[in-house]
Image: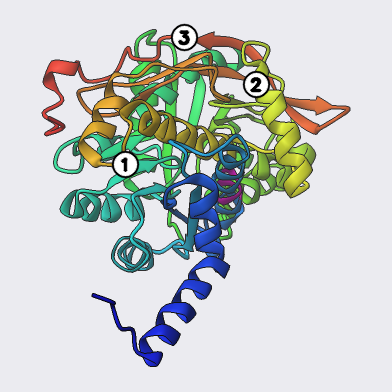
Amino acid sequence: MKSIISRRSFIKMTTGALAAMSSPWAFRRQAYGAEEIRLGGISSLSGVASPIGHELANGLQLAVETINREGGVLGRPVKLFLEDDESKKDSGLSKARKLVERDRVHFLAGVVDSSICMAIQHYGKEKKTIFVNTGSGNDVLTEPPNCSRYFFKIQPNTRMGSLAVQYPEKSFGNNWVFMAIDTVWGKLVVKYSKLVLEKNKKVNIRQEIYVPFSETNYASYLTPLVSNQPDVIMIVVFGSHYPRMIKQIRQIGIKSHIHSYYYERPSVVAAGDDALGLSTFALYFTKNPKVPKAHTFANEFNKKFKEVPGGQGATAYAGVEMLLEAVKNAGTVEADPVIKALETSQFKNTVLAPKVYFRRSDHQAIVPVFVGKIVKDPELQYEFQLEYTIDDPTELLTPEDKTGCPVQ
């Protein structure tokens, strides 16, 4: 018996087929044989964290482009959906909801500010969506009640990065002042830095100064230090605070050695020569002799974005690489197998270090801590000069059997 198709049905079928064949989506599906793997990226493209938020976003973008150029993952292209959290918690959570519920992303990645990260990681747990945080260092993110099996963190926490204070303690004197942003993260860095310094019982901590997050003028905090300058001022800040604070310390006439909690290349460049000699720890730097891939990545990043990357760009790039390598190892985008792959894989030859892995107990990435200082560089203008490496920075971490994280 012959099947009879009406003229209206024929036109509808033909039009739909032609539209499907001509759409970019259909072309990509034909080319790769499957629909896209959708990655939701969130970063601070405006607001106080935007100086490093743009770099993070660029790192996400370059990682996705590189992976697609190499053929995608599981024969599928990766598509990045990028959103601006505006350096605000409510905005970040709203953007995460949009990405998961409207754009239907498989994974979330990025985020600089810890308070924004915290809101998103609870939402990710609710939605059973894996979230790889590439830009926040706060310890509380991998502690109850925040940690979960759907959350993985790339940046070292404050217990790891604080180990770097051993360098300025030995090299620049024992009379110290802390100047930190008045947030949970800022106070944690001070807490664990003091814990490291107290081991040798040599350092005299004169003062702990906590600056409001909205502050832009530090004169009232710095002026009392002019007449009786400490040997070391340790600054614990990020984003626009970083270069502004360094410049104001120098402009007011303070000659103390400055130790910054971590190396933030865009902010060092913004601070200019006032940052020279500053000691710090770095998770990534361009000319790392132990990580040849770091220089290659920097060249590609600079070619595309006309700037040399710092830690936020590198951790974003590495985070996407590791996440998608886990997808490849799992053979699926389903959350449970990908989580298992993230927990059990040794990620080698990353832009951060020869080997990176996540602790199974709390999903904190374990990476070397590079300790050094800021110097002039004929090629890069300013660069991090390595003094030594802490290959195993787990000394202050909570033992794996005591984290209390519900990751299983």
> Which residues, given as a range, are shown in magenta?
55-59
Outermost residue toward the front in this view:
1
Q: Residue 333, labelled with which disc? A: 1
Which of the pair 155/9 is nearer the observer? 9
Q: Which residue: 57% across, 60% down? A: 216
Residue 121 position within the rendered picture, expressed as x and y whole percent measured from the top left: 26, 49
Q: Do the residues labelled 2 and 1 touch (CB within 8 Å)?
A: no
Which of the pair 322/359 is nearer the observer? 322
Which of the pair 191/255 is nearer the observer? 191
Q: Quadrant of the N terminus?
A: bottom left
Disc number lying in front (2 or 3): 2
Q: Which amino acid does label 3 sit on?
A: Asp
Q: Mark 2 points at which residue?
A: 293
Q: Residue 391, labelled with which disc? A: 3
How many numbered marks have been drawn onto this rendered protein structure?
Answer: 3
- What distance separates the C-alpha of mark 3 from that of mark 1? 32 Å
Assess whether residue 315 is covered by the magenta stretch: no
- What distance separates the C-alpha of mark 2 from that of mark 3? 18 Å
Task: Please tell me whether mark 1 sits on a helix, a strand or a loop.
Answer: loop
Magenta stretch, overall SS: helix
Residue 35 vertical placement versus 271 (above, below): below
Q: In this view, does 384 lie to the left or right of 327?
A: right
Residue 238 seen by the camera: no
Disc number lying in front (3 or 1): 1
Q: Residue 16, labelled with which disc? A: none
Q: Residues within 10 Å of mark 2 (few under 14, many from 20)?
A: some
Residue 211 vertical placement versus 171 (above, below): below
